[in-house]
Image: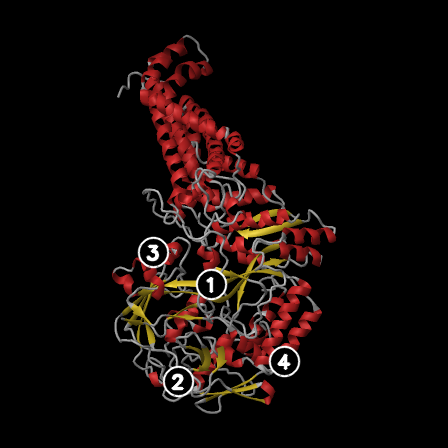
Amino acid sequence: MRNRGRLGAVGLAVGALLLSACSSGGGGGGGNGNEPPKGPDKNRADNYSLGTKADSTGPAPEVPGSKKGGTVNVLQRDAFTYLDPAQIYYADQLTVQMLYNRSLTSYKIDEKGQVKLVGDLATDTGKVSDGGKTWTYTLKDNLKFEDGTPITSADVRQAVERLYAPWATDGPLYIPQWLSGEGQEFRKALPDGPYKGKHLPASVLDTPDEKTIVFHFQQPHADTPYAVAMPNIGAVPAKGGKDTGKNYNTRPVSSGPYKIETLKAGKQLTLVRNENWDPDSDPIRHQYPDRFDIRFGVQEPDSGRRLLADRGSDKNAMSFSNAVTIEVGPSVKNDAGTTSRTFNEVQPYVDYMAINMRRIKDKKVREALAYALPNGQILGQLGGPNAGQIAGNLLAPSLAGWKDSDPFGKKAKPNGDPVKARALLKEAGKEGQEIVYAYPNTTEYQKISVVVAQALDKAGFTVQKKEIDSNNYSTEISKVNKKIDIHRASWGADWPVGSTVVPPLFHGRGVADGGQNYWLLKDAGVDAEIDRIKGITDVKTASGEWVELSEEILTEHVPGVPIFYNRQWSIWGSGLGGVKYHSVYGTTDPTGVFVK
Amino acid sequence: MWRRFKRDRAGVVSAYVVIFFFAAALLAPVISWLYGKNPYTTYGIERPGLLNEFFYPAKPNGGIDSEFWFGLEPGLGRDVFTQLFYGMRTSLMIATATTVLCVVTGILIGVTAGYLGGRTDYFLGRFIDLLLAFPSQLSFVAFTPVVYALFVSPEKETPTYLRVITLIIVMWALGWMGLARILRGQVLSLREREFVEAAKVTGASPWRIIRKELLPNLWTPLLVQSTLMLPTFVTVEAGLSFLGVGIIEPTPDWGRMFAAGARHYENDITYMFFPGIAMVIFVVAFNLLGDSVRDAFDPKTKR
């Protein structure tokens, strides 16, 4: 899952120049306090479970104090690139689609933050047979699109098959790849998608009756219940010419509690009630407000200021993904009145410093880098412990079976360990080793480059800093022949199992231009291990094995240095209730929001 | 003339202020040595207790105390006092060099076009039009990475002197046209005047006419323009640093300090206060100085 939070968040804050009297000062305790904000960590693996059939039955339990009616204003920084569920992969769009799109399964989150994966369009999380290769889903009764036509298995098939069309490149492609082949290979099975009257054979994707969908995968896939929770495994009308392929993006047909009223590209999106949505069929969503009025182009400092000020229409405002930034952070924290309308939670995103293993071949040098990097200082430039939590290992705490390991002592020494790093470098005989460090050319990352270069200098490296235009950054770092030794990279799990982190990041297959194997790690042992764990049919066993493997990769190969786990700090207006954290997407969950 | 200038009290005061700024900028290393801090050390993140959990100065008023006279920078915790002087040094050096280059180019091209007239004037005029049509900010952004890629190996850091030279060249290349235009117009009207005719009749060479007859009459627009130009270049340079094509971290930069101050003003107004006030005083003083120097040169335009 991709996060466009941090990197872009460095926005150009050309604030108004108000010169008033002297400031009252930062205040607060000293120390670069690395202790995270208090409160239970909702993003922990033991918070996740698979729901039963009873859990999957609607309606969703009423939110205490909820009322119907009113308009919820939503302030968002970026316009949504996609509304078409087939193409959605970014956290902000994953959040909005919850309101108008239903998938086979979905995440049900209670007020304590417990997450259960339950059947959404389907009656449960799926029945497995044939040693994990065949998964059967049955649709609930009384499911309708916004125009009143019933949702049948043909519509789910349509949603899956349109992912084979050549334009459907931006969403997650787990299901089609599992059905018809890795990489882009799967597209050959249905080159035009469902648009020319062809369908996948029943031996691959079968719809024996109006209510049943059967997936026949090539390999066993234990985490299918999670994969069909991705928004593109839902329902798209197969009949009536509503599915216009690529153009479906401007007006997707709703299966959820809200439907799209108007979309002004780049400016505004309004959602209104979908009268054909049946609350009794939906275990997750509510339909409290009359409308959602989503405005784009509100920079994070501005949304933070407006929501903190809590005046006029901003009283009923929230944001899905805009975070409280450093500009308003201290004010929010010092204002006791905001505690009931904020949360600060760990997201499933991890920031790494990737090491180019093709250029830094000596493992000792990579270890020295790992010891030398000043995680706490890097995080400090982005807002300190409120913006993230120092990472000890490669996996986010939200992943099933996660262990709080810290092989390079990053938590104990947030400023790095130059003594140990220097010793390792000496051992390797590489003192003064030149390191080409690339960073996106933004205000924050220029500052981060200062602390990184300083720490590496102390450890005995010679740093060559290269700034890269932030618009080209992600392209440049995913080139195989990059002339870069270390750079920042980030990844988030699509669902809370290591299978969505370890294979895409560390399998040798990912060594390709545009691939996510940023460290260019190509190790037969690792690849074999990944393939072996993929074959395990029990999710729980597999989860533990992924954690073990990631640990082994980090200590045996040192492909990169985990820097921090991102946190989402959200604030909303005092006129809203039922706002909670969606720990899988790392955003604010709008499904239970109501106007007080 | 000198006496006339000395009588203008505002002019004298602004002259002292401007001299002070230039001296402070030039003597930045000395000041930093006397004061015992440097602009590169990140005191705040090395010594616990100076910054709070948001990496803002923990003490009130931006962390001002007997040790850090102007407080600490948020985030990195560097010393603002030395940052400011070093930053002024960077900015003033670049702005002065660019202004000098622009004035020289402006005089050369403007006077040539005006004095020679005819086809030369036409072609120079169109050339100026062409350059004026370039969106300058965009050209800077597009041009600088190309220069760096041309001169620096992809595996080496871009040296600061190359950044400085590139900045000066790009700002110069698109900064001299206004002045040239104005001078051309002035020369055009002057060259038909009797004293120029008289000089021509007595057999003076064009070079002598330009030097002795025309240039003394051009002092007023020249001074006004260049005193406006220098602060403008300070701010343009600041803008470019802000866009990431100018001077980047860790080289201290006045404009970038100011931009960062604008970002942190809600929580640390002190940090914007010092570079901001310094810049306001400098720009005002420089403009007043320009005014009174012009008055001193040209007694007819009495206020």
- Callout 1 secondary element: strand
Work out how far the residue at label 2 is from the one at label 1, CA to CA, in angstroms: 38 Å
Badge 3 or badge 1: first in the primary sequence: 3
Q: Amino acid at mark 2?
A: Ile
Q: Is residue A261 above or below residue A222?
A: above
Q: For the residue labelled by badge 3, is the local secondary structure a helix, a strand or a loop? A: helix
Q: Disc number at residue A305?
A: 3
Closer to the eye: label 4 or 1: 1
Q: Amino acid at mark 1?
A: Arg
Mark 1 = which residue?
A: A567
Q: Nearer the viewer, mark 4 or mark 3?
A: 3
Image quarter of the C terminus of chain A: bottom left
Percent position (x, y) of residue A545? 62, 75
Q: Judge the density around disc 4: few (<14), some (14-19), many (≥20) Cα neighbours within 10 Å.
A: some
- Chain of the residue under label 4: A
Q: Is residue B133 visible?
A: yes
Would you name the residue on which mark 4 appears? A535
> Which is closer to the viewer, label 2 or label 4?
4
The quadrant holding residue A514 is bottom right
Say which element carries label 4: loop
